[in-house]
Image (tube, grey):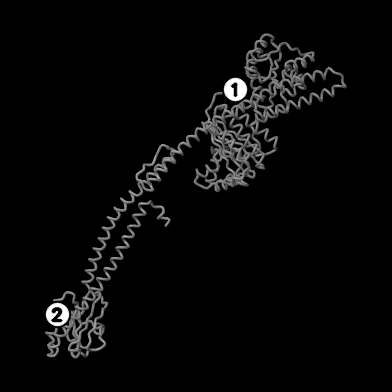
């Protein structure tokens, strides 16, 4: 269904010619070898061999052929995997009508074509998701507080911490509140981060 | 009383019996001592009077002839022949000591210690001296005209008798205590045997050993209790078995239902994603094509149509994600949960932070991934629905053979013990627990009003090498 739509869309363009089409990766791979196209438009979700695997194989066997992934997936992880597999372009289906020509021309010109919004996310996750400054203790933690922090970071529940340190659950809650206050944070995840930075785990 | 309650039946009986025996021994000892003492004093008084009378009669003639030497001999003789006589002395009518048996001089304060009201009369008096109690008996000589004789009788004999009697009585009491203790032990053992038998059987049942029965040791009330207990335990065993069977069936059914639901969701999600999505995309591209080839007047209209298709595609995408994110099947739990948390943050504009520590192979078993994803989803949904929180943490930690997830918020929390929670809310928690149990995990919810809520999930993981569906 989509192939017919694509064909109609691409036929509109004088400088683009559809040389072959296939319903799955098994059929596509021999066609790539036979027709040696400049660009392959490929869906990530394919029956049988996955789109990503298909990209890897095309890139391995026909380094000159460039691949544009055409997909429903909006998650940057797919983009990441796709680029890692060797895709030169990534086009979301919902935007295909508007950016497809542009994508094909960019890739043909030897550029990478990625959706702007996702490229930003990719950049961010590539740089790690460190947001904000490192947590700093305003006052040094006591020995017992450090113990509680370590257990919190290891995913113990309050009741388990209480049982481990032979104190009451109420006391654990107090320690936790004091930890949050001393480290000037609001969330358990930040406590965990601090514990890891301090090498408590 | 509380201390007594902590002891077992036998100890209580033995203790009571011993205390009773001791009490009895003490009472009888006291009474015996009283009786012996009063008898002794009565007899000693009579003896003293007869001794003093005798001494007075024999001393009279000696005083008359003023034979002081024989008088002294008389007194000394009488003292030597009577072991309990401590002293004897004779004083004249004028209060002059005529003879005495004191070797180291006469103690002056004895002179007026026992003075009868009239000269003609005798008198007995108990004196407390440094040598113990002494019965001083005074007897007049010649009706008091020649003075009087004093005989001092010590109670040393009494003390000896009392000591002997006391020792004997204590020995008797001890003997009775020992015999009584043995008797109490045997009796209590015999009495409590059926009770202990019952207790053992009950303890075995508590441990889960339903085959244990109590031995019926007697035909009395306790025996009847044992029979009733055995009947009850048979009944309980049947019920427990029935319960287990039902639980097994329920678990199996639940597993099937959840499995089927997940499968169905996955299928529909795929269908929407792959088929309907493709169709709509194709339609969109067709419209674009048409738009480019049509006169300027109708382009605007075609563009609107195209935007509608785009929006539908968006909705479809979201729907498919909600049903079952392809990411979960394609890239695993970490990616899917991270993505869900990101979307959740954007959708609800809440401060949620995710922390992942992953030291396992990338992919876990399919059931575990789905269960954990759904539980996180439900926990975050609850945060939006109930918690009114401003900060939320999602921690995912996979180490060794266990996966641990914590979803914590700083919202209003709730009372975990409160029974008045709405049935629907409880069902949500219950569902999470069930899901966790189906993959062998456990779910704990810690919350208290005003303190936020934390959901802890632990799942044992069997790591599975990169399974890509």
> Quadrant where the N terminus of chain B lies?
bottom left
In the rendered image, which residue does mark 1 sit on?
A: B468
In the rendered image, which residue does mark 2 sit on?
A: B76
Badge 1: how crowded within 10 Å, few (<14), some, or many (20+)? few
Residue A132 image position (x, y, % from top left): 66, 38
Q: Which mark sits nearer the N-terminus, 1 or 2?
A: 2
| Residue located at (55% from left, 48% from top) | A171
Q: Does residue B135 appear anywhere in the picture?
A: yes
Depth check: A93 or B286 in front?
A: B286
User: Which circle marks residue B429 in the picture?
Assistant: none
In the displayed structure image, the side of residue A181 where residue B169 appears, left or right: left
| Whole-number angstrom distance, CA of label 1 to CA of label 2 | 128 Å
Depth check: A144 or B370 in front?
A: B370
Q: Chain of mark 2?
A: B
Residue A200 falls in image quadrant: top right
| Residue located at (35% from left, 53% from top) | B11
Depth check: B191 or A58 in front?
A: B191
Residue A48 image position (x, y, % from top left): 62, 17
Dot 2 lies on which element?
helix
B113 is higher (above) or lower (below) than B313: below
């Amino acid at each position: 269904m989509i192939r017919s739509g694509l064909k109609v869309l691409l036929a509109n363009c004088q400088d683009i010619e559809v040389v072959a089409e296939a319903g799955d990766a098994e059929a596509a791979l021999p066609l790539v070898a036979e027709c040696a196209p400049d660009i392959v438009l490929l869906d990530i979700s394919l029956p049988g061999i996955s789109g990503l695997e298909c990209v890897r194989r095309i890139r391995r066997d026909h380094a000159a052929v460039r691949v544009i992934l055409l997909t429903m997936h909006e998650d940057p992880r797919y983009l990441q995997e796709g680029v890692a597999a060797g895709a030169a372009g990534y086009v979301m289906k919902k935007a295909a009508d508007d950016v497809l020509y542009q994508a094909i021309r960019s890739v043909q010109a030897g550029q990478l074509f990625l959706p702007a919004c996702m490229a930003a996310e990719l950049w961010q996750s590539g740089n790690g998701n460190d947001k904000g400054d490192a947590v700093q203790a305003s006052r040094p933690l006591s020995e017992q507080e450090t113990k509680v922090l370590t257990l919190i970071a290891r995913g113990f529940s309050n009741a388990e911490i209480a049982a481990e340190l032979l104190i009451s659950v109420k006391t654990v809650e107090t320690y936790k509140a004091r930890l949050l206050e001393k480290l000037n944070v609001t969330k358990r995840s930040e406590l965990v981060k601090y514990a890891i930075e301090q090498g408590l785990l | 009383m509380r201390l007594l309650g902590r002891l077992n039946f036998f100890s209580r009986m033995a203790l009571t019996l011993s205390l009773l025996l001791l009490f009895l021994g003490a009472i009888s000892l006291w009474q015996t001592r009283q009786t012996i003492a009063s008898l002794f004093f009565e007899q000693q008084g009579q003896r003293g009077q007869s001794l003093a009378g005798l001494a007075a009669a024999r001393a009279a003639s000696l005083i008359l002839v003023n034979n002081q030497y024989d008088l002294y001999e008389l007194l000394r003789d009488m003292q030597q022949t009577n072991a309990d006589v401590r002293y004897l002395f004779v004083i004249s009518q004028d209060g002059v000591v005529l003879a005495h048996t004191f070797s180291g001089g006469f103690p002056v304060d004895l002179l007026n210690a026992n003075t009868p009201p009239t000269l003609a009369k005798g008198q007995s008096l108990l004196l407390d001296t440094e040598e113990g109690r002494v019965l001083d008996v005074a007897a007049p000589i010649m009706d008091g005209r020649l003075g009087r004789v004093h005989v001092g009788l010590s109670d040393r004999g009494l003390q000896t008798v009392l000591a002997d009697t006391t020792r004997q009585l204590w020995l008797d009491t001890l003997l009775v205590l020992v015999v009584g203790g043995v008797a109490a032990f045997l009796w209590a053992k015999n009495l409590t045997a059926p009770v202990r038998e019952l207790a053992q059987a009950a303890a075995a049942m508590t441990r889960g050993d339903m085959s244990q029965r109590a031995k019926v040791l007697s035909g009395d009330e306790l025996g009847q209790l044992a029979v009733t207990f055995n009947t009850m335990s048979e009944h309980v065993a049947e019920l427990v078995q029935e319960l287990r069977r039902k639980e097994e069936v329920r678990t199996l059914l639940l597993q099937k239902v959840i499995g089927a639901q997940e499968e169905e969701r996955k299928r529909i999600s795929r269908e929407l994603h792959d088929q309907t999505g493709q169709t709509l995309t194709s339609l969109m591209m067709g419209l674009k094509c048409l738009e480019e080839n049509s006169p300027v007047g109708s382009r605007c209209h075609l563009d609107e149509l195209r935007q509608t298709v785009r929006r539908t595609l968006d909705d479809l995408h979201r729907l498919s994600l909600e049903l079952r994110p392809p990411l979960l099947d394609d890239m695993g739990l970490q990616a899917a949960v991270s993505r869900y948390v990101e979307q959740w943050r954007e959708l609800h504009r809440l401060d949620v932070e995710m922390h992942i520590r992953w030291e396992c192979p990338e992919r876990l078993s399919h059931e575990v991934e789905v269960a954990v994803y759904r539980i996180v989803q439900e926990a975050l949904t609850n945060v939006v629905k109930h918690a009114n929180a401003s900060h939320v943490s999602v921690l995912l930690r996979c180490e060794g053979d266990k996966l641990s997830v914590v979803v914590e918020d700083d919202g209003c929390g709730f009372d975990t013990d409160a029974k008045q929670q709405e049935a629907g809310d409880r069902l949500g928690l219950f569902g999470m627990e069930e899901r966790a149990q189906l993959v062998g995990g456990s779910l704990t919810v810690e919350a208290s009003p005003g303190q936020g809520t934390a959901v802890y999930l632990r799942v044992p993981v069997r790591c599975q090498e990169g399974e890509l569906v």
